[in-house]
Image (spheres, coloured by chain):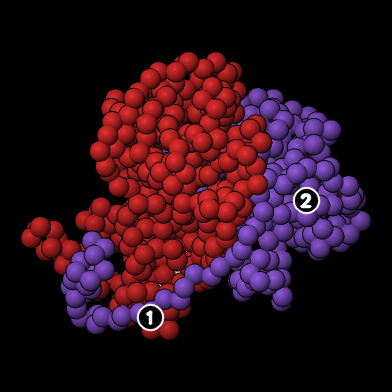
Chain colours: A purple, B red
Amino acid sequence: MQTIFATPEQGKEPTQQKSDMKILVCISKTPDTTAKIAFTDNNTKFSGDGVQWIINPYDEWYSLVRAIELKEADPSVTIHLITVGGADCEPIIRKALALGGDEAFRIQCEENDSYVVAMQIASFAKSGQYDLIFTGKETIDYNGSSIGAMVSAALDLPFVSHATKFQLNGNNALVTREIEGGEEICSAALPLIVSCQKGMAEQRIPNMKGIMGARTKPLKTIEAESHQAQTSISNFDLPPAKAGVKLISPEQPEELIRLLQEEAKAI
Amino acid sequence: MNILVYIELNEGKLKKAAFEAACYGGDLAKQTGSTANAIVFGETNEDLSTLGAYGISNVYHVINSATYSFDARAFSKMIAEVVQKQSSDILIFSNTITGKSIAPQLSVMLKAGLVTGAIELPKTSNGFTVKKSVFSGKAFSEINILTEKKIIALQPNSYNVSKGEGSAQVQSMETSSPEVKVKVESVQKVSGEVSLTEADIVVSGGRGLKGPENWGLVTELAQLLGAATACSRPVADVHWRPHHEHVGQTGIAIAPNLYIAIGISGAIQHLAGVNRSKTIVVINKDPEAPFFKAADYGIVGDAFEVVPKMIEAVKKIKQQA
Ligand SMILES: Cc1cc2nc3c(=O)[nH]c(=O)nc-3n(C[C@H](O)[C@H](O)[C@H](O)COP(=O)(O)OP(=O)(O)OC[C@H]3O[C@@H](n4cnc5c(N)ncnc54)[C@H](O)[C@@H]3O)c2cc1C
């Protein structure tokens, strides 16, 4: 096994791109990772009280930044951002525009069911003729991991999930993806849908110019298509609290091992 | 009703997650008075009839040119054909990388409501409700599936495997061989490693270990325990360890039987990915480290002194065994 893991420097490599490429980046709003998880309405709704909202980290750090890198390598690239949700998503999409992207779209729709959200994105993407659609590998709230694959089925476009690297060679993409216990490099012709995770790009912080510029970038609201939800949330529940830690003296790690074997029956 | 379980192979071998999915499907069949069948893609040396001991009645084995490498779109199309042929109502997948890239496709293709990351059998007495973990393990949610056809992707390490009696009927099945549009060019496997999401025991290291040169402590303890190795996010960020070992809210969520955290502070984002572990052990020199609040057992001490002694103690019990 290797012990040194080299930094992927894909962002700096010259990529041979097809010109005038159109990329659609899916952006989702999630509670901040330190947000207190609490529920209201008889435990049927997440309580947004005092919660800071952020761009879903996978969407921001990996898929959006990788799209921006592709545009930096070739300014003829157009990046569109799409979010499905209410008006409360707008600060999030402005924040995304501050990092990069040319134009944003919000589909006015309650984002309760992955299927309905994916159908909205699919129908938008179809009319936009995108060469590439990027999503994050999952959202950190509902952990659904489904949107990219659903859009792929709806549009009958090839899909590569859990991508850790992405490179273009003309009309062909070379994508490294995580597999059980390793990595796989695959190739596919555009148009293509990719779900992105760690490795794709390095997190960026928007600069002043980006933040100012984002204010005037176009953000269009679009009416949702009507689709029947396939699921509904019945309730939420918090895990039971831990009983408390049993501390063992640092002089006696063998006692810890004994407890793990005899009491916890874990080894 | 008719349940179809997608059985995942890893390099031609049945994975632990596959047995979990088989048992889950078999138990759901018992609960609903139906049968559970399985579908397997690609060549294998395994005796697939053994799936019968885990609750499976028939195994449909598909081998064609599209099953040799993984293209999510092609696999989904073939599964949809089998579902049509067998009139399956409920599909079970493992919520692995593979499952996550095909189950949602079938949800669209079959108009079947989907729950990914299920951790229990559904409640079927009044509707059809599946429990899953949300907010990366910080909470649970019960989801109603409203459609006639249903799809569940079972979270690895969440369902007990129990082996009974019986043998499944194995039959090869023909499907069309859809065009493979995502071509696998090369595969790099880190062999001999225990898969992180399936591991019973995980030994994990944080920034407290000071540098990659000290990881021998983690890997040696892991090897002795037959454990997988993991790490905190900053450790992967500075490339002390590979990205795929990063656990937490923005990494992999795991639920092993035993999680041993060495030199990890226990930030909320880290806990999110590991707090479904059955037993948590924390080794940290700071008694105020937040991880102790989430732990079952702890040692307040210097990892460089404590872990070598733990390794000796494990060696001793392994010798006695
Ligand atoms: C949006 C967001 C998402 C994040 N997602 C994740 C995630 O998915 N996973 C994740 O892990 N983090 C995540 N983080 C980072 C997280 O907040 C913490 O910074 C991180 O988990 C800390 O890693 P650590 O415990 O290894 O390092 P530190 O916080 O530096 O802790 C090191 C610990 O080692 C102990 N120590 C030092 N020396 C010794 C010694 N000799 N012996 C024993 N103990 C010692 C110290 O007491 C300390 O508790 C995220 C952060 C943000 C903002």
- In this rendering, the answer to whether B189 lies above or below A28 is above
From the top left corner, tell me how far across and down residue B189 is, in percent. Answer: 38, 37
Q: Residues within 10 Å of mark 2 (few under 14, many from 20)?
A: many
Q: Nearer the viewer, residue B281 or A4?
A: B281
Q: Amino acid at mark 2?
A: Thr
Residue at coordinates 20% horizontally, 81% vertically from top-left? A251
Discs 2 and 1 lie in a common subunit: yes
- In this rendering, the answer to whether A130 lies above or below A245 is above
| The C terminus of chain A: image quadrant | bottom left
Q: Nearer the viewer, residue B115 or B25?
A: B25
Identify residue for label 2.
A83
Q: Amino acid at mark 1?
A: Gly
Residue B260 in which image quadrant = bottom left
Identify residue for label 1.
A244
The chain that hosts pointer 1 is A
Question: Left or right of B212: which side holds B238?
Answer: right
Q: Is residue A3 visible?
A: no
Circle count: 2
Residue at coordinates 72% horizontally, 58% vertically from top-left? A29
Closer to us: mark 2 or mark 1? 1
Q: Name which of mark 2 and mark 1 comes first in the sequence.
A: 2
Residue at coordinates 43% horizontally, 79% vertically from top-left? B293
- In this rendering, the answer to whether A47 lies above or below A99 is below
Task: Please tell me whether mark 1 sits on a helix, a strand or a loop.
Answer: loop
Task: Please tell me whether mark 2 sits on a helix, a strand or a loop.
Answer: strand
